[in-house]
Image (spheres, grey):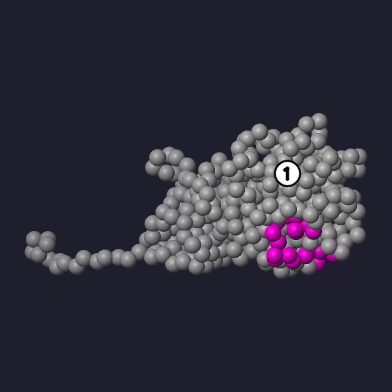
């Protein structure tokens, strides 16, 4: 199997506010685009022709892979579902067999290899991931018996055991993709599917017509990144794994560590990067090129820092943090979470969550992480109430956001792109894209003078 297809044409609306100015597949996970993990896994098992089906902002993907001759990007903005995306990728193709992955998942290369091997033995096959603690109502699910799929249901109330992770298809199933009904009919009574063509519905038709889909279960890491807290958790999981792979210090040309630095762990420093005086590191640290970490900066656990960054002046970074390129974390700023590119935390603030690119937090901006009732925040995604297992009390600020001095953002709040949270604002609700919110202050005036002090 030498051809692969990555389905990345979705709108990413559930990932708001992070897929407004970029395709969802370009959301960074440990400083790499999300869709690159599927592409890299395919390349690792010998797939040399990869088509990415992209929707809006497809140009961002084309630009990122502009020097890679193995990647072809097909723009398909009118996609009505994954089945249409797959058909668009196959249009004019002479491939007899393809490996298909999603652009918003992270899948283990060994699992993809096992899927390809199963296809070679038994024909059309799917890689399936055990639901575990995941709710079946959030996924298109299936049941598996004797290494084959027996039933496919869309977002069922229960009864299913697995969700889909990837596919291996031969040309014989292509007609079923072309004849997709455009709506998921395999649902329980009372469920309301959208008018959208899903690959899994074509698989259900294939099974109903008397054919078989072999099932290969995942054994490695599988992450489906769909909502803001899942972006944060994926960064934590992948970042930890990358850092744990370090087995010794690695210093590129021009990199240095000051003898006064207190380091417990291994460090990888890129070209011309430095760790300066009185820096404290507890855990493994991976740093890009031309980054300076200096003057008492504190890093408490496994951390990844990008290129051209400054971490200085007693700032504190919690373990598991990911810092993108060209970021500044300065005087006594505290970070727990993810910074995308070109983010400034300059002076006295505390942040837990995600900050989109080109975001600037004013001095003393604070993001609450502990509710007075010690509870977890309920989120609303596309009108549906959600109860995240992880990071429900984090704050989620989109790209090109600014805050004023002493802004307070309460647990779980999201701020849309191109928005401003003004000085002194206490934000306790989600803020739409392109919105400014400010405090209207009422001043009371009165007389004052020496007579007030007994003169």
- In reply to whether residue 274 is colored magenta, the answer given is no
**Residue 336 coordinates in the image, percent (x, y):** 54, 49
What residue is rendered at 69% in x and 43% in y? Answer: 186
Q: Quadrant of residue 11?
A: bottom right
What residue is rendered at 77% in x and 65% in y? Answer: 74
Q: Which residues are magenta?
A: 67-87
- Taking the image as shown, residue 409 lies to the left or right of residue 81, namely left
Residue closest to the eye, 197 or 261: 197
Whether residue 57 is visible: yes
Residue farthest top in this picture: 146
Which residue was labeled with disc 1? Answer: 164
**Residue 439 coordinates in the image, percent (x, y):** 35, 64
Residue farthest left in this picture: 455
- Taking the image as shown, residue 355 lies to the left or right of residue 182, namely left
State how many labels appear: 1
Q: Secondary structure at mark 1?
A: strand
What residue is rendered at 61% in x and 60% in y? Answer: 19
**Residue 176 coordinates in the image, percent (x, y):** 81, 51
Residue closest to the eye, 254 or 128: 128
- In reply to whether residue 69 is colored magenta, the answer given is yes
What residue is rendered at 66% in x and 33% in y? Answer: 159
- Taking the image as shown, residue 443 lies to the left or right of residue 372, namely left
The quarter of the picture where the C terminus appears is: bottom left
**Residue 398 coordinates in the image, percent (x, y):** 54, 60
Residue closest to the eye, 443 or 101: 101
Vertical placement of residue 127 versus 74, above or below: above
Whether residue 111 is visible: no
């Amino acid at each position: 199997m030498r051809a692969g297809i990555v389905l990345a044409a979705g709108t990413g609306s559930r990932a708001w506010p992070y897929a407004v100015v970029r395709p969802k597949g370009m959301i960074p996970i440990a400083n790499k685009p999300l869709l690159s993990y599927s592409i890299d896994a395919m390349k690792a098992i010998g797939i040399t022709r990869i088509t990415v089906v992209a929707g809006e902002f497809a140009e961002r993907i084309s630009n990122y892979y502009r020097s890679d001759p193995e990647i072809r990007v097909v723009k398909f903005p009118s996609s009505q579902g994954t089945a249409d995306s797959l058909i668009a990728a196959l249009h004019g193709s002479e491939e007899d067999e393809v490996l298909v992955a999603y652009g918003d998942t992270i899948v283990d290369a060994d699992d993809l290899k096992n899927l390809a091997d199963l296809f070679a033995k038994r024909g059309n096959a799917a890689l399936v991931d055990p639901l575990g603690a995941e709710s079946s109502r959030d996924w298109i699910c299936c049941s598996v018996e004797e290494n084959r799929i027996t039933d496919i249901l869309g977002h069922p109330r229960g009864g299913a055991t697995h969700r889909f992770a990837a596919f291996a298809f031969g040309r014989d199933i292509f007609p079923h993709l072309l004849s997709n009904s455009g709506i998921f009919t395999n649902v329980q009574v009372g469920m309301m599917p959208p008018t959208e063509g899903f690959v899994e519905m074509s698989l259900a038709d294939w099974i109903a017509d008397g054919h078989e889909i072999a099932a290969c279960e995942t054994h490695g890491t599988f992450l489906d990144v769909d909502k803001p807290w899942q972006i944060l958790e994926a960064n934590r999981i992948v970042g930890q794994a990358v850092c744990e792979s370090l087995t010794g210090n690695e210093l590129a040309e021009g990199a240095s560590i000051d003898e006064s630095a207190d380091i417990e762990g291994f460090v990888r420093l890129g070209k011309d990067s430095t760790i300066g005086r009185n820096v404290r590191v507890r855990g493994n640290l991976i740093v890009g090129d031309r980054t300076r970490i200096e003057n008492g900066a504190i890093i408490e656990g496994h951390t990844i820092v990008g290129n051209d960054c400054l971490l200085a002046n007693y700032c504190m970074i919690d373990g598991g943090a990911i810092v993108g390129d060209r970021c500044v974390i300065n005087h006594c700023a505290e970070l727990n979470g993810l910074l995308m590119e070109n983010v400034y935390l300059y002076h006295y603030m505390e942040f837990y969550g995600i900050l989109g690119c080109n975001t600037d937090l004013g001095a003393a901006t604070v993001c609450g992480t502990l509710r007075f009732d010690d509870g977890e925040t309920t989120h609303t995604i596309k009108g549906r109430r959600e109860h995240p297992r992880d990071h429900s009390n984090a704050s989620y600020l989109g790209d090109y956001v600014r805050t004023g001095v002493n802004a307070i953002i309460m647990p779980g709040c999201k701020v849309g792109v191109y928005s401003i949270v003004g000085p002194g604002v206490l934000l306790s609700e989600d803020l739409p894209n392109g919105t400014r919110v400010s405090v209207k202050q009422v001043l009371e005036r009165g007389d004052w003078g020496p007579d007030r002090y007994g003169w």
